[in-house]
Amino acid sequence: MAKDQINNAVDQQQIQYKSGMTRRDSLKLMMALAASTLLPAVLTGCDSAPVSKTDTGAEAAKTTSEHWPELKLSPITATGYGKDPNLILPPASPWPLTLTQAQLTLVAVLADILVPREGAVPSASEVHVPAVVDEWVSAPYERQQQDRVTILSALAWIDDEAQMRFSKTFVALTKVQQKAIMDDIAFDTAETPAQFKRIASAFGRFRSLVLAAFFCTPEGTKDIGYVGNVPIGGDYPGPTKEAYAHLDKVLADLGLTEYAYPIQT
C-alpha cells in the first residue's frame, strides 16, 4: 500500500461518525421531513445566497476540470413502511440503511460545516442529522431514490475533488482546505465556474436536506423559536394582538385586507 493510502486510512480511522439515534427516531424524522414543506423552502432560500471565496486552494481549484462520478447503484427493492396504527416499530426494519461508514463520516463533516455548534445550539451531527440523511437516501420511495443518486454522486465528487487538489479524502483535509472546496461549490450562481455548476446544484440538494433535517429536530425547532402545538387549559384565548398585527400587515402587503374575517371580541 502506498504511503498516501496508508495515511488516508489512518485519518479515516481517527474520524468516524457514530450515530446515537434509534431507528425509530430516524424514521420519525424522515417521515416528518417528507410530509413537511420545509425541504423545498430551505432549498429556495439558500440557493440565492452570495458566494464567499478563500485564497487557500484557489490555485489548486483552477487545475481541476469538470468531472462527475458515474455511479452504478444497486436499486433498492425493499417495500415501503406503510401505516403504523399502533405507533410501534415493526419487528423488522422497513428497509436496510445503505450509507457506508466512510460516507456517513463525510456526511457528518459536511453537515457540521453547514450547521456548526454555536454556543448552546448543537451542531448537525450532534442531533444525528447524518442518521436522518442515511434514512432518507435508503428509503425505497421515488422522491428519496432520486435524491439518493444526487447525494451519493455529490459525496463521491467531493472526495474526488479533495484527492485531485490535496491527495487526501475530504475528511482528512484541514479545515482551511475543506473550506476552499466548499466555497467553490456552495451556491449555483451566475458567477459559479462551469466546472462547478453540476456539483453546486447537487450540493444544494444535500444542503437543503441537512438544514431541513436539523430544523425538524427538537433542538432545531427551539433554535428558530417554533413552539408548535401545546395544550391550553380552559377556553382557547385566540391569537395574540401581536399575531393579529402581523396578519394585518401581511394581508395589507398582499392587497387582501378586504377579504379578512372580522375579529370577534
Image (spheres, rainbow, N blue to C red):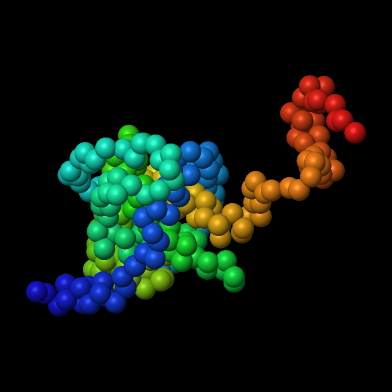
Using the image, determine if residue 78 lies above or below residue 112.
above
Q: Could one spot residue 40 in this view of the protein?
A: no
Quadrant of the frame with the N terminus:
bottom left
Q: Residue at x 73, y 47 (%)?
A: 232
Quadrant of the frame with the C terminus:
top right
Q: In the rendering, at what x and y percent does residue 118 appear? A: 57, 68
Q: Is residue 98 left or right of residue 194?
A: left
* Observer-nearest of 170 and 104: 104
Q: In the rendering, at what x and y percent does residue 129 appear? A: 43, 57
Q: Is residue 98 left or right of residue 125?
A: left
Q: Could one spot residue 56 in this view of the protein?
A: yes
Q: Residue at x 27, y 37 (%)?
A: 79
- Residue found at the far left of this picture: 1
Q: Residue at x 28, y 59 (%)?
A: 103
Quadrant in the rendering for residue 45 = top right
Using the image, determine if residue 148 lies above or below residue 113.
above
Quadrant in the rendering for residue 179 = bottom left
Count the marks: how many? 0
* Observer-nearest of 158 and 115: 115
Q: Is residue 81 left or right of residue 116?
A: left
Q: Residue at x 31, y 38 (%)?
A: 80
Q: Is residue 22 left or right of residue 167?
A: right
- Residue found at the far top of this picture: 259
Q: In the rendering, at what x and y percent does residue 152 appear? A: 29, 50
